[in-house]
Amino acid sequence: MSKKNNKLDLDSLVQGYEKAFPFYQVLAPTGEVVNTDLEPKLSDEELTELMRRLVWASTYDKRVTLLNRQGALGNYAPGGGQEASQIATQYALGEGDFFAGTYRDLAPLILHGLPLEKAFLWYKGHMKGNEFPEDFQAYAPQVIVGGHITHAMGVAFGMKKRNKKNIVMSLSGDGATSQGDFYEGINFAGVYNVPYVAVVQNNGYGISVPVEQQTHAKTLAQKAVAAGIPGIQVDGMDPLAMYAAVSIAREHALAGKGPVLIEALTYRFGPHTMSDDPTRYRLDEELGEWEKKDPLVRMRKYLEDKGLWSEEQEEEVVETCKQEIKEAVAAIGQVEKQKVSDFLKNMYDVSPQNIQEQIAEYEEREMNDNE
């Protein structure tokens, strides 16, 4: 047996993994197209609608941050900077596709069809914030890091069993890829060849922990290799690249070729949540470099060059969003306060004896308080 070219070179293997995952981009930070092959074939109306959604999400983020500071809503996880990885991905979904996001992904969830009032009730911890319309194809925002990956895979498996021509897309952060749920989810998705697209928003930090301290992998996309599924790395600050990547992955899944993992390289401009201080673990210079890659700036320049966007159009979207938020805040103020007894009733389909006893106890207390 020949021993030629049979050297075991582990260092080259590790380096090869990094080179195996090219970086996909359509728009440069200045708005110029750098990859015409990947540029999505969207109509002028579709491009304009995508920009409207990006501006809406950015405005929503700023307004909800303000509401949190005023004490009107509960703790908030800002999404500023991640508009491309959140909004352009959801925009690429088709009617009937299922969406599973995290506590940071309320804006795409709303654009997927969740009433704004429901989102605000969810922020306040009100049980009615989890009462979704019957035909709404999405899960409630997942707070457990990575916990929704297995759930999304299960929905996709159900779609395959029922021969539905739809996919499931999940959004998660880089921290989710360190969780067992993530590995189990993509492994089973690969085994059963389900129509599932897992988008990992790599914003550089799991709260305050840099990605390089979370994993020794050179990319998060390469984690797809262990599951035997495609993994790609995309400019997560580029709306057109994110739209194109999800669209192509969706076609792949609908063709019966199975799941796809997309790593979106992005950045959150604000804190992890409003109780976080990012200045304790990252430098202003780092933030400044990423702000130069702002997805709204490059998309705005791209559309202005085509004559499709103006300051007046943007201001109209901003004012519309502000008004919608104002109306939603007023609406949740009219919702009856949450009762402990009602909360307990919603815990089980058939309440066990100890919960029944607690329900009776709290109903009596609540009745006495109203007298």
Image: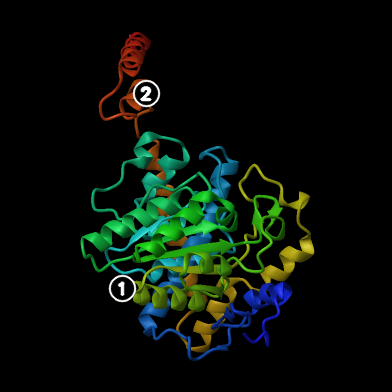
Q: Residue furthest bottom?
A: 36
Q: Residue furthest left?
A: 162
* Mark 1, other Cα within 10 Å: few <14 / some 14–19 / many ≥20: few
Q: Quadrant of residue 34?
A: bottom right
Q: Residue furthest front?
A: 1
The residue closer to the viewer here, 316 or 352, is 352
* Mark 2, other Cα within 10 Å: few <14 / some 14–19 / many ≥20: some
- Reading the image, the residue beneath label 2 is 339
* Colour mapping used in the image: rainbow
Indicate the secondary structure of the residue bearing disc 2.
loop
Which residue is drawn at the image coordinates 77% and 49% (left, top)? 280
Residue 356 lies, with reference to residue 55, above or below; the image says: above
- In the rendered image, residue 286, in percent from the top left (x then y), is placed at 75, 65
The residue closer to the viewer here, 104 or 17, is 17
The residue closer to the viewer here, 281 or 68, is 281
- Reading the image, the residue beneath label 1 is 256
Residue 291 lies, with reference to residue 137, above or below; the image says: below
